[in-house]
Amino acid sequence: MRIYLCGFMGTGKSVVGKNLAYRLGFPFLDMDEEIEKEEGISIPRIFKEKGETYFRDKEKEWVRKIITMNNVVVSLGGGTIVNEDNFRLLEDTGVLILLEASPEVIFNRTKSFSHRPLLEVENPKERIKELLNKRRFYYNRVSIKVDTDNLSVDEVTEKILKILDEYKRNSHTF
C-alpha cells in the first residue's frame, strides 16, 4: 500500500503523514526532506542556487523512486502533482489524497517559516492565491480530498483512516 499526501504547503502533509504512518505502522517519507538530504542543501538554497526547474527534476526522480516502495506514507512537495507524468504515476500506483486549506489558513500556518522559497515575496497572501489558482486544475483532479482548515492533526488522520477503510471495503487494491 502506498499513500501519497499532496497539496499546497501548509496544508499539513508532513505532520499528518507522520501521524498516519505511525497509526498504520508504515515508514514515513517526506519527499522534500529526502531531496534536501540527497542534495546536501535546503530547498530554499536549491531554488536560489540551482533554480526551480532543477528542483522539479529532482521531484520527478523521487516520484520514480517512491512508486517502487511498499507500505509507505509519502508527503509530496506542494507542486509535485502539477507535472502530468508525476500525477499519472502517483495516481496509478497508490492512494493519492489531497489535503486542502483556505489561503488564509495556509498563510497563517506558513508566515513564520523562512523555508518557503515560493512565498518569499512582497505579498505572500496574494502569492498563495496565485499559486493555488495555477495548481487548481491538478488539485481538482485528485478524487480524495480532505479539508484541514478546522481540524487537528489527529482529526485529519482519523478522516484519512476512514477513507482508506472505505477504499479497501470497495475492493480497491493499492
Image: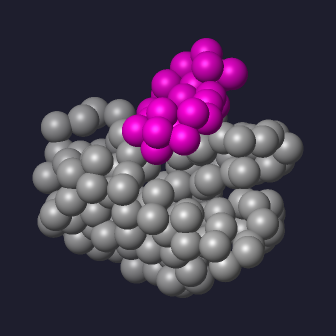
- Answer above or below: position of 171 versus 109: below
Residue depicted at 55% across the width and 64% down the height: 165
Q: Which of the 4 image quadrants contains residue 124?
A: bottom left
Task: Report whether 11 appears left or right of 13.
Answer: left
Residue 90 drawn at (x, y percent)? 73, 61
Residue depicted at 28% across the width and 33% down the height: 114
- Answer above or below: position of 73 versus 93: above
Task: Report whether 52 appears left or right of 121.
Answer: right
What residue range appears in magenta?
18-47
Q: Which of the 4 image quadrants contains residue 41?
A: top right
Task: Report whether 13 appears left or right of 4.
Answer: left
Residue 170 drawn at (x, y percent)? 67, 79
**Main SS class of the magenta portion in the image:** helix
Residue 159 can be seen in this image = yes
Residue projecting furthest to the top: 40
Residue 55 drawn at (x, y percent)? 64, 42
Residue 31 can be seen in this image = no
- Answer above or below: position of 140 versus 162: below
